[in-house]
Amino acid sequence: MNQCDQLLANPPPTDEPPKYGPQVVRNSEQWRKTWWGNRTYTTKALDSAATLAFTRMIGGKQEYGQLARRILMDCAKWDPKGATGYRYNDEAGMPYAYYFARTYTFVHDLLSEEERKVCRRVMKIRGDEMYQHLHPRHLWQPYSSHSNRAWHFLGEIGIAMQGEVEGADQWVWFATNVFRNVYPVWSDDDGGWHEGFGYWNSYIGRFTWWADVMRSAMNINAYDKPYFSKIGYYPMYLLPPGKVGAGFGDLNARGSASRAVPLVSQLATQAGNGHWQWYIQQMGGSSPPPGYVSFVRGTLPDTAARPPDDLPASRLFRGTGQAILNTTLDDATNDVQVVFKSSPFGTQSHGYEANNSFLLWAYGQRLLIRSGYRDSYGTEHHRKWMWSTRSVNNITIDGQGQLAHSAAAQGRITQFKTSPTIDMVAGEAADAYRSSSGAPLLDRFTRTILFIKPELIVVYDRLEAQRESTFEYWLHATQKFAVTSQRKIDLQVKDVGCAVSLLAPEGLEFSQTDQYDPNPRARVTLREWHLTATTPSRARNVEFVALYRPHRDGNQPPRNEKLTKIDGGYVLTADLTDGQVVALLPTDDSALLSADGLSADGAILVQRRDKDGNVVATLKLDQ
């Protein structure tokens, strides 16, 4: 009521917003101001109208309905294919369509027949424009980012206009087919999401209302789908309670667990999943946001919380090619997390980071990061730095990385094993490295990560090039790396440190800068540090063996470690706070490796021992 009274006292403006103008350059600051400004302007007007109209329906003042009617009819005068047209500016066109349809539904009884005809004409033009753009293209090519929310907005206006607008039934039929056959395209059956947490949070948040509509209007339960039955595990594993830093994908550097609370709360209720409800409760629970959608959802039954005691701390989202390795799901301040990507989706859309990249997060701090700042989508910095392999913790060959922003730059996770004390994951990304003519650069790039929880991460890389090449090993952080030697590199981020040792190959040459290539726009003051270790000579084959030891201040890790070349590979020994780890790392898939009481045939084998030499855990990862 208070919000509606404020709107009565100060109604939103309803003059038609402007177009870009003939001199405005796409992606310029002026273009962005109009592009996004028209979205917020449209939303302010028509969402206000929908709020007023709904509140009047449930017993609010009649004046609320009259103001909603006036705003609706003012907005109906806007050119349907003008500044807020779907094809001209879909960021304004989409909210116009669904907020207009909601308001029309809520004030239907207050409108004259002539006013209804005007509204039907507007929705006919706008709905047809959306339908003609989406149908049938989105069924065969469902990877357009914006279209992946437009289709269910079209379905919503189709529901609202059924029986009043010709073609509305086709809009609903099309939306239902999209959901059944191709949505959500960026997902996998394990609950993973290719485009990253920020876009997941935004797009799925919008979708949940369509899930409500389908359940009510068509008796379709979205959570019967394999993806939706697992959907809440993605934020739960990526963002343990208290975590800041949401992994790969656009706009995720400052993503946080708290931002997941409103959506996961809704998912837990709709799906009846106790694990997701537990996750929400660890962060204090969720207060229903204001608005008519939350009011309607208030009738759903509560879900009992269920601690994740029956779940492993690490999880593989195989279809989207991401493994999230944690020491705990309970509390981010006690967690060390490795996120690894090698994806069959490639580097397309908002999940553009190169395959075989990894991130390291520990005890509340981002240690090894994906670098850059999206000043605006598609700018020079976004395209030429953030989409490039150089911007992530990865490897380039003669300065060249993977195909940028391409579905063809595919990787795959080949192995994954998890246990309470050791996790192992391997990915293959050679096919993603191609020259400008499309010729392959690599025959092999296998990256294996051994996580000896919580204090040691071993990254083992095997690369085989088409010709003799130099190889550049890239690391990125928010703070400068202190490089004493390749076996003694230190990183400090507030009260958390990371000791780094690059044990192989020998003779690496280091460079470090806080500049990007190219830098973002002048208004962006962010600077991060980029460390590059380059092989000293050209070769066709190379193995990198790197150790990372995250730690809190005052808990310096042991740095006794040894890498020994043996027939068919290496044996690695490294001290731990409570013992030692021994690993066999093959360079030949058919060789029998034997050392320190261990043997393996062409496979990575890792064993953890306590201080007395007793075996704590052994894991084998076939190549």
Image: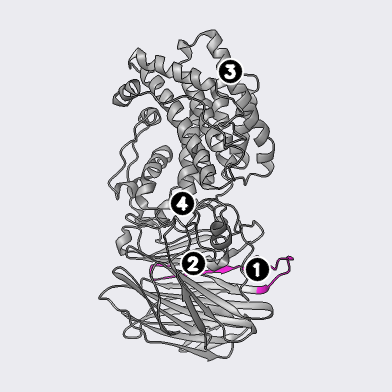
* Above or below: residue 186 compared with residue 10: below
Residue on which the image places disc 2: 358
* One can see residue 212 in this view: no
The image shows residue 298 at horizontal and vertical percentages of 35, 30
Q: CA distance from mark 2 to mark 1?
A: 17 Å
Residues rendered magenta in the picture? 419-443
SS for callout 3: helix
Lower position in the chain sequence, tag 2 or tag 3: 3
Residue on which the image places disc 4: 197
- Identity, as a three-letter code, of the amino acid under mark 2: Phe
Q: Quadrant of residue 554?
A: bottom left
Residue 121: which disc?
Answer: none
Q: CA distance from mark 1 to mark 4?
A: 26 Å
> Neighbour class for label 1 at 10 Å: few (<14), some, many (≥20)?
many
- Identity, as a three-letter code, of the amino acid under mark 3: Arg
Lower position in the chain sequence, tag 2 or tag 4: 4
The image shows residue 249 at horizontal and vertical percentages of 50, 55
Q: Is residue 142 left or right of residue 420?
A: right
* Above or below: residue 508 compared with residue 156: below
Q: Is residue 232 left or right of residue 542?
A: left
The image shows residue 91 at horizontal and vertical percentages of 53, 38
